[in-house]
Amino acid sequence: MILIAENINVMSQTIGPALKERKAEPIQALAKAETAAGVQYLDLNIGPSKKFGHELMPWLVGIIQEVSDLPLSLDTTNVVAIEEGLKLCKKRAIINSISLQPERIEQTLPLVKKYNAEMIGLLWGVDGMPRDANERCMHTVDLVYKANELGIPNEDIWIDPIVTPISGEINQVTACVEFMGMLADIAPGCKSIVGLSNVSNGTPDHLRPILNRTYFIMLMRNGLYSAIVDAFDKEMQDIAFGRKPNLVSVVHRAMDGESIDLASLTKEERDYVKTVRVLTGQALFSNSWLEV
Ligand code: THG
């Protein structure tokens, strides 16, 4: 499992203003902490940053590389910002992300080749959000074909099915799990990636970790290769690196619809089982699902 730290992002209450004011110290402190937490990449998310991205991203890459040796994932829709960042990256970087919109393909795919980068292929179609797992497969074939045409091999393409919040359409949440199980057949060699915290976006803070971790186990079961995650969620790392076999096992049983005697489980295991039921649509989502 490859973990990419999500914490350096423009939405953050400390990092957002620091980016705007070009204050290196709080950003470098966070990058050091993320690195010490044991992740494999740092995601640098400056948002769309239309006006200043072209100088913000190279500044950010520079100050991050002063304090961390980890490879970087450059996260912005500003193509010039991506290129200016890539010029400075010491390690092989990931372009996050390239969707199927024609201008995105035309402008950004060539940068993958030019800078020997890897790419995240975001399954956002010309008509927006894919409706189900099949549409995600069609987009994958399309995107991989176009990348291959430019000489980008499948091994350098990380496919992202686009995780959406549990508070939204449940079919979209299950579609990503289903899609994970199909990817190896339709695009052999391609890697997979999700923005895991998306699933718990908008839910109360204390409920986010259990949603993220349970969904993580469900996706891992279907072959998930990597995830953009909260670097400081220790239990998530325990799960990623095989240190929570009991939780993985109960989640699998719950996914299979086994009737599980909840009284035989620990409180923690019960919470995971209940959360599987919410994430598979067997139980209705509300902010009190753990209490029922
Ligand atoms: N796929 C790809 N890239 C992505 C996403 C994806 N990049 C952005 C996002 N989704 C993944 N990154 C984050 C970063 C932060 C949060 C969620 C996803 C988040 N932050 C808290 C919040 O907003 O409440 C806390 C903010 C803070 O740090 O203070 O939830 O899907 N390819």
Image (cartoon, helix red, strand yellow):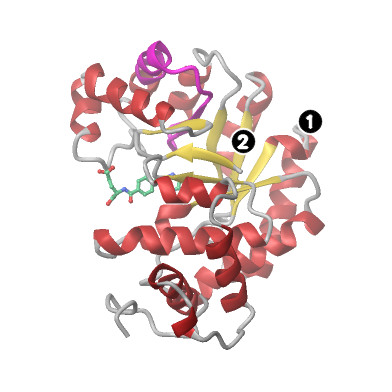
Relative height, residue 59 to residue 231 (above, below): above
Instruction: Tell me which segment is drawn in magenta.
Output: 59-78
Which of marks 1 and 2 precedes in the sequence? 2
**Which image quadrant: the N terminus?**
top right
Residue 267 appearing in the image:
yes
Residue under pointer 2: 119
Element type where label 2 sits in the image: strand
Identity of the amino acid at label 1?
Gly
Residue 120 is covered by the magenta coloring: no
Distance from label 2 to label 1 (Cα)? 13 Å
Q: Name the disc covering residue 284, or none.
A: none
The residue nearer to you, when weighing 125 against 232, is 232
Identity of the amino acid at label 2?
Met
Element type where label 1 sits in the image: loop
Question: Image point 49% across, 74% down: which residue?
Answer: 276
Which quadrant of the view contains residue 47? Answer: top left
Question: Image point 51% across, 31% down: which residue?
Answer: 41
Crowding near the residue tagged with mark 1, few <14, some 14–19, many ≥20 C-alpha atoms within 10 Å: few
Q: Is mark 1 within 8 Å of ligand 1?
A: no
**Horizontal and vertical percent for residue 25?**
23, 18
Question: Image point 71% across, 63% down: which residue?
Answer: 181
Residue 199 appearing in the image:
no
- Left or right, 184 with respect to 65, comes to right
The residue nearer to you, when weighing 26 against 143, is 26
**Horizontal and vertical percent for residue 46?**
35, 33
Q: Name the disc covering residue 151, or none.
A: 1
The residue nearer to you, when weighing 28 against 142, is 28
**Which image quadrant: the C terminus?**
bottom left
Q: Nearer the viewer, mark 2 or mark 1?
A: 2
